[in-house]
Image: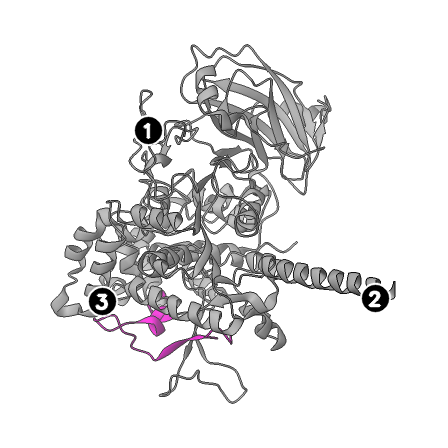
Amino acid sequence: MKKILSVVLAVLITISAVSMGVYAETEEKVPVVILQGYSGPNLAYADENGEPIVDENGNVQLAWPLNFDNLGADIAELLADVTLNQSDLGEAIVDVLQEYFEPLEMYPNGTSKNNLVPYPSGAANTRASTLIENGMEEYIPERVVADMAIEEVGAENVFGFTQDWRQSQVDSAADLDAYIQEVKAITGAEQVDLYGLSHGGQYGTSYLYYYGHKGDVRRAIFGDPATLGTSAVGSFFTGEYVDVNLEDVIRFVEHGFEYEQDWEWLLQLLLLDEALVEIVNSALVNTDLLEGIVLIPSLWDFVPYNYFEDALQYVGLTEEANGKLYNDTVKFHNDVNNDELNLANKLADLKSSGMKIGYVCGSGYDSINGKYNSDILIDTYLSSGSYCALAGEKFPSDYVQANTVCNNPDHYHISPEFDIDASTGFLPDSTWYVRNQGHGMIMHDEYSKNLVHDFLWGDIENVYSSKEYPQFNMSQNNGEILYARFDNTSSGYHSTNDTALVIKNMSVEADVVIWSIESVGADIDFEYSQGLTIPKGKVVNINATNNDFENAEIPFEVQITYSLLNTQLTYTTNVFCFTPMTDEQMTQFSYLSQVADVVPDEVITESTTVPDEETTESTTESTTESTSGESENKTENVEGDIPKTNRSISTVITALAVLAGTAITAGVVIKKREE
């Protein structure tokens, strides 16, 4: 009997060991490599051996990042000088910018005048566990994503790639390939996962184009990617007038600070609205500033394909005078940054080989130069490859999707606002578009943040994989305050299946009072009481009746006017766009009816709570008209606490530096505001 039990026990132990081995194999943790936004990695002065120079106090001598607090203070001092006229002020700002950016200057061939190296560098030194052990956690990049990765795969498997972000896409892609080989050697892993933000999405894509065939990447997702550059740099490199939409810039700031009051009044308070636009343009055509930065290779790779030839002529970049700089950027533009299908075909091949690739792109803002639909800094047509209507415009009502990349008849790829045709993009079935998501704000948006998480560590394959992640959605940054969609159709669309409008108060600070809900372009009635109060973080269903689909325009709007119950007394109208879908379309594109709850178990009963009579009377005088049918916030009767002025000035000046082509992406991080 004992012998039989021993045999049984041995068999059980063997099975258990085999099972554990199989489980360990399936639970193998894939390292994550994080690719930072533009100017994210630190640049240090180096000695003749290429080692960072350390001062007598043991501190590494950094040439970058700039001290934007000091820069903001210097610019603020100039702005306060009443003796300077507009022309003199523009020149003075150029002088200050030149002084601050002098360490970054390049020779004509695109090599650095100063001996600079990224710090820290190399996979061993940029491993999250190493940085934590050495008390250098501040060097862990894109911290929200890094923390998610640390929780999923452990700090020993999280790496932050650093490089000289001034170099070309050709060089960055090669350096990233070498870095990935280091990560594989250190961890013993066969593959890595990639997350790239902004510029990181650009050189991450370039890496996939040039080296993806090696099979070293399992999954890659890029947020707010500068895939094919930005028209802001295109304008700068061609001397084009930049018509800055400062209200969008301020909304961008609000989102970055997760600020739930409105700052549109700030520019008027500082008397910088129209004057700043002219100052920016005078700076952009200043030859001294132009000469200082047009030799930075990475900026040339930000020049979009439709600006490139004009930029070469305007700046005078030639192979004879600029050698490697010219050859590298021409190669990148010929290979990747063009309006052909090179990149789409390459990515399709990589997906066919088993690699999972995705993009999360912002939209709904005017671009810096006022021309294109964008996330403020990166144009949506350049981040995604999709055909997009110009800023403030829509496709004709009879437009049908082009299907140049995706020609599946059961896939509907036109945005609810009728301004994006995703069937023409690099990755039609795995690119997500988030309306009113400002550049670099991806980790301030719950929808986008969760999407990145589930793409890397869940089972999300494409835009049809989960009802939680429709291809087109509205931002869920709490700075937007309200989120709205119909109850039984995917975000941004409307069908006969719908019975109610679902409104979520995304504020984490204040309740919201709804004053009016109006349908424009479609005959829909909403049943609600004026003064309906939605507590912070809660959801309400508003019954919708009288849906006239035969006469509905494409698209139509729902305008919701509300107030935050705080001390600011701001009355704002959010405009949400919807495309009505026929019953036949809903049958053909059945996935549009597979919708998730906005917030499970958080729906409240319609309330008729009304603030005091004085507040109610004041709101009846507030009217807001819609312009061009865009999703947007409109504010009036604004009062409130003034944010810290030095920080506000610094942010505006950062935007100015962005326009000058020196900090165009999320490398200069807008930190969450202090409470």
Depth-wise, is mark 3 or mark 1 nearer the camera?
1
**Colouring of the image:** one colour
Task: Say which label, 1 or 2, has the lower sequence index.
Answer: 2
Amino acid found under the numbered disc labelled 1: Gln
Q: Position of residue 571 (x, y in %)?
A: 58, 31
How far is the residue under mark 3 from the one under mark 1? 38 Å
In screen coordinates, is 675 left or right of 322? right
| Label 1 – label 2 distance at C-alpha | 73 Å
Helix or strand or loop: what does disc 3 sit on? helix
Closer to us: 542 or 16? 16
Q: Residue 281, percent across and down?
A: 29, 51
User: Mark 3 or mark 1, which has the lower sequence index?
Assistant: 3
User: Which portion, as a residue range, is magenta?
Assistant: 97-125
Give the residue number, with chain letter if any, for mark 2: 3
Please check the rendered image and state whether residue 115 is part of the magenta-colored stretch, yes or no: yes
Left or right for 15, reference 348: right
Q: Is residue 182 above or below residue 668?
A: below
Residue 588 appears in the rendering: yes
Residue hosting label 3: 325
